[in-house]
Image (cartoon, rainbow, N blue to C red):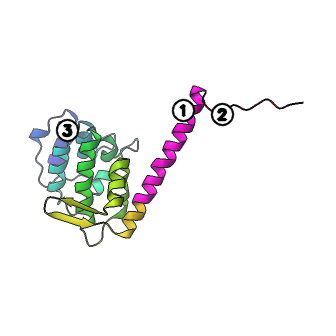
Amino acid sequence: NHTVQGLGLAKNGNFGAIEYKNLDLRVVDEDKKNLLHHAAEQGRIDVIEQMLKGQRYAQDLRSLIQPDKNGHTPLNLLNVSQEEKNKFVKKCLLIELQKENPNYNVVTELLEVLDKETLEALMANPSIEIGEERVDINEKVVGFIIDQLNGIREEERRSASYDSTRTGSAPSVAPASR
């Protein structure tokens, strides 16, 4: 099976020798990592796109959210700049949202990878456009974006509160008088 051979090659970063047509991205190694996990760890978006195209890219992006034995998905492991992640994820969102019945589990996982600025830009202009392709973002996805932004803002508030207590700049409390 060339998928199993591909896993061995991918672990060593030898993506050039992998046949991308008809790969079964459900096949995993002993760590429950598929080929996409290995490509993501090595920052190879080009390889991920090739593999997904071999899997009828527009048909199924679920393999991007398949967790390994430690709970990490290829999206979580994507070892590239945030700018590159945003570009890749927007392309995946475009593909998923063009489907007649988008997989909203995939959509929410994709949104979790985007940074705050990109999410805010999607809220300001609820559409994704890449080249000649464009898709408007429906109300359900806008709701997911709002949830994601609220989570980011809450995390920022917690972090700011934690930082202020560590630096001693938190308001001091006067001792109780007797």
Q: Is residue 157 on the magenta stretch?
A: yes
The amino acid at mark 1 is: Asp
In the picture of the structure, the residue carrying the numbered disc 2 is 171
Residue at horizontal 25%, vertical 40%?
38
In the picture of the structure, the residue carrying the numbered disc 3 is 10
Whole-number angstrom distance, CA of label 3 to CA of label 1: 41 Å
Residue 158 in the figure: left or right of residue 110: right
Residue at horizontal 18%, vertical 47%?
3
Neighbour tally class for label 1: few under 14, some 14-19, many 20 plus, Cα within 10 Å: few
Q: Is residue 160 on the magenta stretch?
A: yes
Frontmost of labels 2 and 1 is: 2
Frontmost of labels 3 and 1 is: 1
What is the count of numbered marks? 3
Whole-number angstrom distance, CA of label 3 to CA of label 2: 53 Å
Compared to 169, does 72 lie above or below? below
In the picture of the structure, the residue carrying the numbered disc 1 is 163
Q: Nearer the viewer, residue 69 or 75?
A: 75
The amino acid at mark 2 is: Pro
Q: Residue 16 location, x and y as percent? A: 10, 39
Neighbour tally class for label 2: few under 14, some 14-19, many 20 plus, Cα within 10 Å: few
Residue at horizontal 23%, vertical 43%?
84
Looking at the rendering, the stretch of residues picked out in magenta corresponds to 145-168
